[in-house]
Amino acid sequence: MNPKINKIKSKKSKYKIVCLTAYSKNIAQAIDRHTDIILVGDSLGSTLYNFKSTRSVTLEMMVRHSQSVRQGISNSLMVVDMPYNTYNNPSEAFKNCKKIMKLTKCDAVKIEGGLKIIKIIKHLIKNKIPVMGHVGILPQTTRGKFKSKGKSIKERNQLIRDCMLIEKAGAFSIVLECVQRQLAKKISNSIQIPTIGIGSSNNCDGQILVIDDVLGLAESKMKFIKKYIDVKKIITNAAKNFKIDVKSKKFPTKKHSY
Ligand code: KIV
C-alpha cells in the first residue's frame, strides 16, 4: 500500500485531516505544505467552466488538470475525481481509472455512491487502484436542489450501511457531503477509515473545501463555505493598478525593458 495512504488512515481519530481541491500547478504548489490530501475535484466543471452540473466534465478535462496539479505536489496525497459516466461497471471503471492513474500519476481516485457501486470499488481495489468513497449529496447524480442528508431514519440507516460497505470493499477514506452532524458522528464512530466532511460538521475525521470558495474566487452560496480571503478583489486591484501605470506610462520602466 502507498505509504501516504497509510499515513492518512493512521490519522483517524488522532489528527484532523486537511484537504482542499486544486485544479492547477500554481494553486497546488501554494497549498501543498498545509494539506494532507489535494483533490482534483470534478467541481472544476462549475468553478472553472461554468457548467450547470459536474455531469459535463470529461475524462480528458480531469487528465489535463490533474497533470498540471501533479507538478505542484510534493507532500500531499493526490486524489482525482472520476467524472460522471466513466465508471458505470467494473471493467469500464478499471479501464478509466487505470488511464487516469497512468497519465496523471495520482495516488488514488474518488468515486460517488454507496451500495450501487460496491462491486466497482471491490474490482478497483482488487486491481490495486486505491479508492476514496463519497456519500451524502452526490453532485453527479442528484437532480434539483441539494438537500442535506440524514433527515429520515431510512436515509440515516442507508448511509451508515453504505459507509460500512465502502469500508469493507477496501476504500481508504470516505467523503461525507452535507451529512447531518449527529449522523456524521455515528458514521465516523462506526468505521475504521477516516471520514472527510464537507458541510458535515467537525464530527468528521477531516475537512475538505473547494479552493475557489476558500479564496473567494467563486460565487457559490452553500452554507458550508468559508471564504478565507477575497482573492478576486486583490486581482481586480492589481489589474486596476496595472491599468493606471500603463495609461500614465509609469510601466514599463527601463528596468522592465530590453
Ligand atoms: O468535486 C469536488 O470538489 C468534490 C469535493 C467537494 C468533495 O467532490
Image (tube, rainbow, N blue to C red):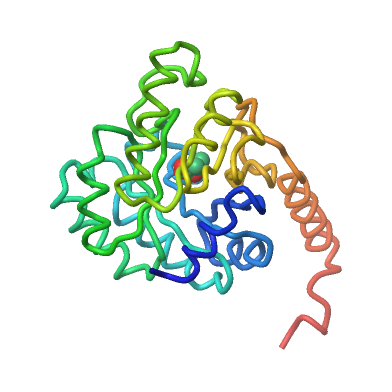
Expressed as whole percent of the image width and height from the top left, the position of residue 230 reads: 76, 44
Front position in the image: 27 or 250:
27
- What residue lies at 59% left-to-right and 56% top-to-bottom? 11
Residue 37 position within the rendered picture, expressed as x and y whole percent measured from the top left: 55, 58
Q: Residue at x 61, y 44 (%)?
A: 207
Residue 89 occupies quadrant: top left
Q: Residue pushed farthest top?
A: 152
Quadrant in the rendering for residue 165:
top left
Question: In the rendered view, would you say 36 is above or below 137?
Answer: below
Image x and y of residue 214, in percent: 67, 44
Q: Is residue 49 visible?
A: no
Furthest-bottom residue in view?
A: 258
Q: Quadrant of residue 79?
A: bottom left
The vertical placement of 159 against 110, above or below, is above
Quadrant location of the N terminus?
A: bottom left
Closer to the camera, 86 or 60? 86
Residue 143 is at least partly visible in this image:
yes
> Residue at 63% across / 41% down in the picture?
213
Q: Position of residue 248 (x, y in %)?
A: 85, 61
Q: In the figure, is residue 19 to the left or right of 171?
A: right
Q: Nearer the viewer, residue 88 or 121?
A: 121
Report the quarter where the C terminus lies.
bottom right
Q: Is residue 153 above or below residue 229?
A: above
